[in-house]
Image (spheres, rainbow, N blue to C red):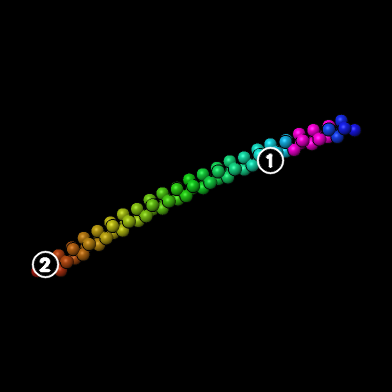
């Protein structure tokens, strides 16, 4: 009887240890997966910031060019208006 109980205890002990390692592996896999997800999200955010900055820079350049053209046109109009025929 003692041998049967001792055998059951050993089998149950091995099962518990085996489950613990499987749980640890699953936990480690989940942590690694979460870390990869965070890294990918950070890269996406960085790309979005870079794209936004580029678009803003292009918009500023276009606005500056438009303002320059408007100033030149106003200067030409002023010259024409001041000419005495």
Where is residue 72? Give x, y as percent.
21, 60
Magenta residues (range): 7-16
Nearer to us in this view, 6 or 47: 6
Kindly identify the residue that appears in the image at 31 percent across and 54 percent down: 61
**Callout 1 secondary element:** helix
Q: Is residue 36 magenta?
A: no
Task: Say few, some or many: other residues with alpha carbon within 10 Å of mark 1 (under 14 / 14 to 19 / 20 or more).
Answer: few
Q: Quadrant of residue 76?
A: bottom left
Which residue in the protein does label 1 denote? 23
Which residue in the protein does label 2 denote? 83
Where is residue 84? Give x, y as percent.
9, 69
Disc nearer the start of the sequence (2/1): 1
Kindly identify the residue that appears in the image at 83 percent across and 32 percent down: 7
Nearer to us in this view, 73 or 49: 49
Kindly identify the residue that appears in the image at 28 percent across and 59 percent down: 66
Give the left or right position of residue 62, taking residue 8 as reference.
left
Nearer to us in this view, 32 or 68: 32
Where is residue 80? Give x, y as percent.
15, 66
Find residue 6 and name its label.
Answer: none
Instruction: Name the magenta segment's main secondary structure.
Output: helix
Number of numbered discs overlaid on the protein picture? 2
Q: Is residue 82 above or below residue 49?
A: below
Q: Is residue 52 above or below residue 9?
A: below
- Whole-angstrom CA distance, mark 2 to mark 1, is 90 Å
Where is residue 56? Give x, y as percent.
37, 55
Give the left or right position of residue 48, taking residue 20 as reference.
left
Give the left or right position of residue 26, taking residue 72 as reference.
right
Q: Is residue 79 above or below residue 52?
A: below
Q: Residue furthest right?
A: 1
**Callout 2 secondary element:** loop
Kindly identify the residue that appears in the image at 62 percent across and 43 percent down: 30
Q: Is residue 12 magenta?
A: yes
């Amino acid at each position: 009887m003692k041998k049967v109980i001792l055998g059951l205890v050993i089998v149950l002990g091995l099962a518990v240890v085996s489950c613990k390692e499987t749980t640890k592996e699953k936990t480690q896999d989940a942590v690694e997966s979460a870390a990869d997800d965070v890294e990918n999200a950070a890269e996406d955010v960085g790309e979005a910031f870079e794209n936004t900055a580029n678009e803003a820079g292009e918009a500023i350049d276009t606005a500056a060019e438009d303002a320059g053209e408007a100033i030149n046109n106003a200067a030409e109009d002023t010259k024409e208006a001041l000419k005495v025929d």
